[in-house]
Amino acid sequence: MKEYGSDALRNLVLIGHGGSGKTSLAEAFLFVGQAVSRLGKVDEGSSHFDFDEEEKKRKITVRSSLGFVEWKKRKINFIDTPGYADFVGDVVGAAQVADAAIVVVDAQSGVEVGTERVWHYARERSLPAFFAVNRADREHSDYLQAVESVRESLAPGAVPLTIPIDEGEKFSSVIDVLHGKAYRYAEDGSGKATEIPIPPSHADQARSAREKLMEKIAETEDSLVEKYLEGGELTEEEIVRGLRAGIVAGTLQPAFAVSAARLIGVDLLLDTIADSGPSPLDHPEIASRDGSKRKATESEKPTALAFKTLSEAHMGDLTVFRVFSGVFESGHDYGNALKGKNERLGQLYFLQGRERVDAHRIVTGDLGAAVKLRETKAGDTLCESGGSFALPEIPFPKPVIEFAVAAKNQGEEDKIANGLARLQEEDPTFHAGFDPTVRQTIIHGLGELHLDIQARRLKERFGVEVELTKPRIPYRETIRGRAEVQGRYKKQTGGRGQFGDVWLKVEPKERGGGFEFVDDIVGGVVPNKFIPAVEKGVIAAMEEGVIAGCKVVDIRVSLYDGSYHAVDSSENSFKVAGSMAFKKGFLEANPVLLEPIYIVKVTVPEEFMGDVMGDLSSRRGKILGMESQGLFQAIRAQVPLAELYKYSTHLRSLTQGRGHVEREFSHYEEVPKETADKVIAEAQAAKQEA
């Protein structure tokens, strides 16, 4: 294929609420741009982008996919992303490498909760935006109302560049507001358009829309404002320049009436992207994590950000990246700036859905993929061999839900561990590992659907079936009081005996103070060679737990007296004596159970605040405060981990899908007595059964 310079590239991320038609619009781009000979359809399982088995089965996008079209001497790259919150990590990664966003909005529903959420990520990156108001061919669609909802909720600078004629089931024509023309699209689904006169019934609407558009365009330059206010007509060159300036600056967001399924209005959207969309050169410099900078030119040293790893059976792994400076060529060595290791780039590709197009070199601003990079994962920076220029990290969202994983068949634990490790490499929002404190393998993700799909992938790709269950809570044990106790271990078996005798003082430390062992022995009543054994016995007892089988924390243990036998004493006997004394002293020092407390930030529309706060209180939560975030309220609270199981799912149900939760570990806190008694009783019962 033709090689394009950086100024001819356009990189866009398709974002929007789940089911708004992002993938259908991506398919329309390919077909209208003559990149494919047939229009892929999600419902028929023929999509070029939703080709994963889970995507075909569920008819939703669960991972981002790349495509491109050659249009008006431009190469337009676009990334189709999931609309469901469980897979928002792919939206974040794609937004990090895009130069603009296409926000897909349903013409019937307008702005929805998923639109609001992904718009937040686009604004964090200050991405210019285009709004594609899709499904204008549906009954009860209302394009202008949908655009108004965009202005109210997301982007005050949103302005129609096209207007539908005969909106609804008879939709076949649009008005090009910018050029004062109208087009009717062929009914054969070819996407071809014929110019027609603007109907008299829509003339006033078109005139009014053009006046508003000219006002927004004029605002981009002082000279244009003066000319426009004085009644002067802007030239074609001034209009094009002002439109592009407004889009790039983020003060103007053009909106388009489209039907992706019937290929109506798609070409006009592509025209505006090609003519007025930002190019990689609109950001002439890139900055590293340490503040050093490079120019976004092909002559600069090479810099690329990996933002996704794709893995397919029989196809191998692909590392997908955006080049921010320089040129990357196959057969050359490049450095991983974060890991200090070199990577040899083998075959390079441009991605067209699941298809690969060979590429010998990938220039500044373009998106590409390399086969089987061993060290480089999403978020890593590739640069010149031996270089350390690392781009800012991708702010992938943190997990909000976890399950314990158990093998359905014995002996497959290693296969599960290997499979989980591979899945974790591919998905930065998925974490997995064995937790020794609860003795379970725990997986963490962004929602139940996210983790359910990962479990299915374990079966399909690695041949192991697992069960997902409620994970144990990593409780801790500690004490409130003090005690001084003796641990005496004496055993005679006919030959050499066992003898160890120690006196320990146990006392609490401040929360988070850890463990401290103090040697207060005077006069050699316990020989120095046995003192480390006493500490080992104490530590072993702490790891095992005393009242509920949970690790003991925040405690000081002092060895201050004891006795020994010249023949029968040994390290093991003093280790046992130390363990015995510690357990006895722990029980006498007012033991208590601690539980992990998390800080949660729940973002919800104001109308749900009361329900959410009441629900948090019922979960033993403590409200810390609230703050306004646009149309939303953010509630911060401390909540025990034991009360957060499946909370993200419950929150979506409670808020009609509009609530969003983030969380992070805060500290350990004493468990209320009633709850503690129940946990201790369950632990002791389980121990007896074992």
Image (tube, rainbow, N blue to C red):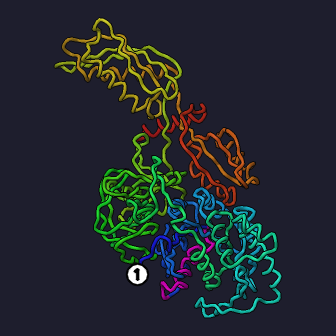
Q: Which residue is more in the foreground, 208 or 560?
A: 208
How many labels sit on residues?
A: 1
Depicted 482 relative to depicted 115: above or below: above
Residue type highlighted by circle 1: Met
Is residue 150 in view from this perspective?
Answer: no
Is 449 within the magenta?
A: no
Foreground pick, 668 / 286: 286
Instruction: Where is residue 83? Give x, y as percent.
Output: 58, 66
Decide: is 681 above or below 241: above
Q: Residue at x 59, y 56 (%)?
A: 124
Determine crowd level at label 1: few under 14, some 14-19, many 20+ residues with C-alpha closer than 10 A. few
Q: Which residue lies furthest to the left in this view?
A: 495
Q: Is residue 421 visible?
A: yes
Quadrant holding the N terminus: bottom left
The residue beneath circle 1 is: 1
Q: Where is residue 638, by image quadrant?
A: top right
Residue segment shown in magenta: 16-37
Q: Residue placed at 42% from the left, 41% from the top? A: 689
Coordinates of residue 372 in the picture (x, y in percent): 32, 65
In the rendered image, residue 562, in percent from the top left (x then y), is placed at 32, 11
Q: Residue at (65%, 63%) from the top-left corner?
A: 250
Residue 483 or 119: which is nearer the viewer? 119
Q: Which quarter of the figure has residue 519?
A: top left
Q: Position of residue 512 (x, y in %)?
A: 49, 29
Does 19 lie within the magenta span?
yes
Quarter of the image containing the C terminus?
A: top left
Is 474 on the left or on the right of 103, as rendered?
left
Q: Is mark 1 on a helix, strand or loop?
A: loop
